[in-house]
Image: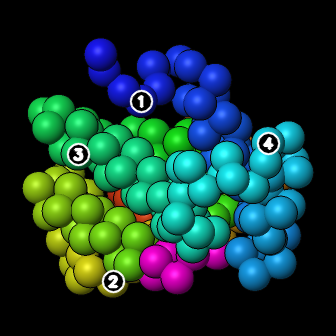
């Protein structure tokens, strides 16, 4: 007879509940201020239940960061495989992921020690996408794609925190704004007499 818990058993639900409560607490209080006892209390399970699924608070935090990174780069890889994907839509989908997962985004994009690496990988993906679209955007023909990608990542990081996660603007609106700043063709010069 097979051993272990069945999928969708109370054990699976307990593990998922621990992850959800940990996301809430880590994103609100930060890693160092969140204790295992806080997580199990919020999840209404025992501490031994916590240790059935996670070795430590650190392993749980690492697991959440891994989830964030896998989801994020899965989205980008899917888009890279689509021929003719417009870069504005890539940015919109990235921002939509952040908006749909605001607490996990706070952890993965801002709080985690791995957040710097995540942002560098995003810059690399932007460069990869833009390198194939140089002919579509005039300013890419005259600017360093690496600098454009770094600047774009900085903008995304800032507006995600101040506008997207605060619900002041939607992912679509922000993608349109960013695209108009970074990629719209320059208007013809108007001579003022």
- Which element type, helix, strand or loop, lies under badge 2? helix
Of the residues under marks 2 and 4, which one precedes in the sequence? 4
Left or right position of 188 against 61: left
Looking at the image, which is closer to me, 191 or 52? 52
The residue positioned 45% from the left and 19% from the top of the image is 6
Q: Can residue 100 be seen in this snapshot?
A: no
The residue positioned 36% from the left and 51% from the top of the image is 70
Residue 185 on image: x %, y %: 36, 57
Q: Is residue 151 shown above or below 85?
A: below
The image shows a total of numbered marks equal to 4
Of the residues under marks 3 and 2, which one precedes in the sequence? 3
Q: Nearer the viewer, mark 2 or mark 1?
A: 1
Q: Is residue 24 shown above or below 17?
A: below
In the rendered structure, find residue 4 and report the number of the disc placed on it: 1
- Quadrant in which residue 38 is drawn: bottom right
Q: Can residue 117 be seen in this snapshot?
A: yes
In magenta, the rendered stretch is 108-116
- Which element type, helix, strand or loop, lies under badge 1? loop
Q: Nearer the viewer, mark 3 or mark 2?
A: 3
Q: Nearer the viewer, mark 1 or mark 4?
A: 1
Q: Nearer the viewer, mark 4 or mark 3?
A: 4
In the rendered structure, find residue 125 and report the number of the disc placed on it: none
The residue carrying mark 2 is 147
The residue carrying mark 3 is 77
Classify 10 Å Cα crowding around label 2: few (below 14), some (14-19), many (20 and above): few
Looking at the image, which is closer to me, 67 or 161? 67
């Amino acid at each position: 007879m097979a051993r272990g818990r069945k999928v969708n058993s109370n054990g699976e639900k307990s593990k998922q509940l621990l992850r959800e409560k940990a996301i809430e607490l880590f994103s609100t209080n930060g890693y160092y201020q969140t204790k295992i006892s806080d997580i199990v209390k919020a999840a209404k399970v025992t501490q031994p239940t916590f240790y059935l699924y996670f070795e430590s608070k650190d392993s749980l935090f690492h697991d959440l960061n891994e989830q964030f990174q896998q989801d994020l780069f899965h989205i980008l890889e899917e888009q890279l495989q689509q021929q003719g994907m417009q870069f504005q839509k890539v940015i919109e989908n990235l921002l939509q992921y952040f908006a749909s997962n605001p607490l996990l985004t706070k952890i993965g994009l801002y709080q985690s020690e791995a957040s710097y690496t995540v942002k560098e990988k995003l810059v690399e993906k932007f460069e990869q996408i833009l390198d194939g679209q140089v002919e579509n955007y005039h300013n890419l023909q005259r600017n360093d794609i690496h600098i454009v990608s770094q600047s774009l990542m900085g903008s995304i990081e800032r507006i995600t925190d101040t506008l997207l996660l605060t619900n002041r603007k939607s992912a679509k609106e922000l993608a349109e704004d960013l695209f108009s700043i970074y990629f719209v063709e320059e208007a013809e010069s108007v001579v003022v007499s």
